[in-house]
Image: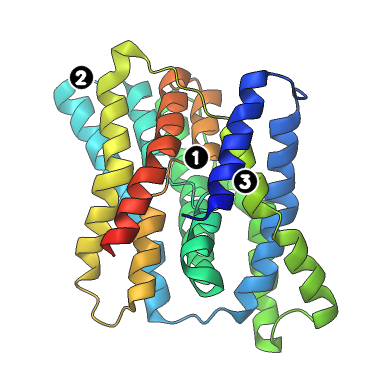
Amino acid sequence: MNMLLVLCLLIGAGVRCTGRYPQQLVPSVNWWLITIALPCVILTLIPHTRFDSTGLFPVLSMWVVFLGALVIALLAWRFAGWSREVCGVLVLVAGIGNTSFMGFPVISGYYGADGLKIAVIADQLGSFIILSTAGVVTMALCSGSGISLRSVATRIATFPPFIALIVSLALKPFGGLPEILQTPLATIGATMTPLALFSTGLQIRLRPPRLLLGPLITGTCWKLIAAPAVVWWLSAGFSSLSHEVVSVSLLQAGMAPMIAAAMMAQRAGLRPELANALQSYGILFSFITLAAWHSIL
């Protein structure tokens, strides 16, 4: 794996251990990533990305991960007696991967710009849509709060990366941005790799809840091992898929849990300690499992 990824993650974890950083550092870095860097990545890549039937598989893969976590949670609720809050965390955190902050740097390191284009499709048309629709519904149902179609639609329509995606699709017939904008925006987008991993390192917390080891192990194993295995198995039914599409889809399926999904679960009061533990252990173990999956592929 690209040493830059490991170094940025370790630097973030090291800074967190010292405790000597501004209180708003993580929210500020994440704001830059979501509002500035990620839209720049989308604006510079999507207009040059070719969409065909094979582009559906990365999106399908993200839904497989989410629906698989949902099935596991329902079975655990029915037969193991897990609470609604625990099941909600399992669906949100083990069902939605960190396909942008971690996925983009990892995929870029393994497969370059061509692989990154596929990763962006999986993230924007897969993970993000799932988080903003099914994820919001899951959070509301498991926390007991109400939801409305208007609030879900507003959340999607005002999300900066989604706006960038719409603009990118509109620019596609014209060949993308003019060169005078393409180069500087690509440079800004390049900040995503180091800052995303630095931010991820800052948020690692290893405090496993003793009474929730079952859900923790179940969620981690599904997200990092079983989910990508299912995606790999499903790819056998799509003979037209290229090796690169299958590989990127599988690795995106096996990414660590999405930070935003874990934060959503925590804010909704869905066992915050479990959400944090799933996210943190998922991040750490994903470096091992992703490398293993890549070597297998």
Mark sitting on residue 81: 2
Image quadrant for the C terminus? bottom left
In this view, the mark in front (1 or 3)? 3
Label 3 sits on residue:
196
Is 133 placed above or below 259 here? below
Question: Please, what is the three-letter code of the amino acid marked with disc 3?
Answer: Ala
Cα distance in 3D space between marks 3 and 2 = 37 Å
Mark toward the start of the polypeptide (1 vs 3): 1
Secondary element under disc 2, as helix, strand or loop, is loop
Q: Nearer the viewer, residue 145 or 41?
A: 41
Which residue: 73% across, 50% down?
35
Which residue: 41% across, 56% down?
252
Cα distance in 3D space between marks 1 and 3 = 23 Å
Q: In the displayed orientation, state which residue is furthest to the top.
A: 211
Mark sitting on residue 136: 1
Q: Nearer the viewer, residue 255 or 295?
A: 295
Is 161 placed above or below 137 here? below
Mark toward the start of the polypeptide (3 vs 2): 2
Give how far across and how far down residue 45 sits, in percent: 63, 72
Which residue: 44% across, 22% down?
270
Q: Is residue 178 visible?
A: yes
**The quarter of the displayed image where residue 31 is located:** top right
Q: In the drawing, does residue 225 fall left or right of residue 113?
A: left
How many numbered marks have been drawn onto this rendered protein structure?
3
Q: In the drawing, does residue 265 fall left or right of residue 156?
A: left
Is 98 placed above or below 263 here? below
Residues at badges 1 and 3 in contact (C-beta under 8 Å)? Answer: no
Give how far across and how far down residue 187 sits, in percent: 76, 64
Which residue: 36% across, 52% down?
291
